Amino acid sequence: MDAYSPDTVLAHLARGLVETERMTQAPGTTGLPYPPSLHIGWNRLSRLMLRQGLPIPPSLPALLDLCEQPLPWPGLELGEGAWLPGDRLLASRRVTEACIEIAQTAGDLEQEEQLMKRVLDHCRLRGPELQPSYERFRTFLIERPVLRNIELLDATREPELRPLVDFLKEAYESVPPSCLRDGKVYVCKHCGWTVTWHGGEPRCGWQQCPGDRDPRSAVPVAHPSEQLLRLREGLYRYVTVPGLVEQEFLRQVQRLGVKVDLYPDFDSWDFRLHLGGGETWAIDLKDWARPFWLARELRTTRKHRHAQDTRAIIVIPDRRVKECPGYLNVLQNCVEEEQGLEYRSTSKLLAEVRERVGG
């Protein structure tokens, strides 16, 4: 992959902005020293723009000003499905959902993503007997984004979680002071993670959460902050948020009476559906807004159908397909056919399952 292609440059720049916000809690001119990922993205962007005779951002404030501008920028034209109307990398110096999504394709993992990779490596080394432990570990992170110290201690005594105790402890952190209001910790009633307050407005860590900026969605926790822990931000962003969508899909499939394996083969897929007669469908649910970047990720990771599965299907939530009507066509056209993948909206896939089982 060309290090100076527009998609690679933008992915590294987005990763740098995400990591800068993590370091400073708001990208700005006082955020130095900034992380290497931002330095790499900035340098590559500058070289790409120079090649095309375009002015380059001469300072960090100028770079951040550019990132506030709607995409695409001159010299960074990309293919269909790369942007949604109004997309930008920063809004009021806060990374946007577009920035976070693009950053996922940069390849270099954040610290919390590295934790999940270490968990997977550990489980794979120990073999299939740890598959139930991995399922329980991932489900626990989705269902318990905020908990009390004593609840975490109780979880470490669960037989399925015991082989992953050290990782489980590492996944949580103390609730920071920025989450306190009038001495209380508030969580979002939709996603369950802590909110931060900006004046009288609660900010959710997931900007597309229904509770973001809605004071009615902020619920006080009936325990002092000293007794509370929260999932680290990267795990909340890359495990809990997509996991909420996965769990809703799982409930819908199970209502059809289908046997489902959760995170089979140590997360090679989100689900494996057993439809009788030895027929299995491997399912990955991808809640990405921009199909260009999802197609890039599928190509880079070489996601493909395994011989044991009858079908391998990438499932996109209906709301994403509605926002971008050509979504499934972009995936079909941009991912190599030999990877053996199919693409469906959630409703279409559920209709196919229902037809297959006669429900």
Image (cartoon, helix red, strand yellow):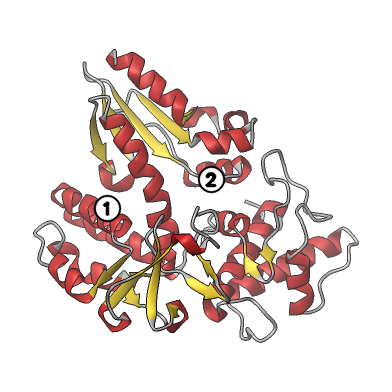
Numbered label tally? 2
Give the residue type that dot 1 points to: Thr
In space, the residues marked 2 and 1 are separated at their CA atoms by 20 Å
Residue nearest the observer in this picture, 51 or 161:
161
In the rendered view, would you say 17 is above or below 336?
A: below
In the picture of the structure, the residue carrying the numbered disc 2 is: 288
Secondary structure category for the residue under label 1? helix
Contact flag, marks 2 and 1 (Cβ < 8 Å): no
In the rendered view, would you say 198 is above or below 250?
A: below
Residue 167 drawn at (x, y percent)? 25, 68
Q: Could you say which disc has been placed on residue 209 in the image?
A: none
Residue at image coords 79%, 75%: 62
Give the residue type that dot 2 points to: Trp
Neighbour tally class for label 1: few under 14, some 14-19, many 20 plus, Cα within 10 Å: some
In the picture of the structure, the residue carrying the numbered disc 1 is: 139
Residue 119 drawn at (x, y percent)? 28, 61
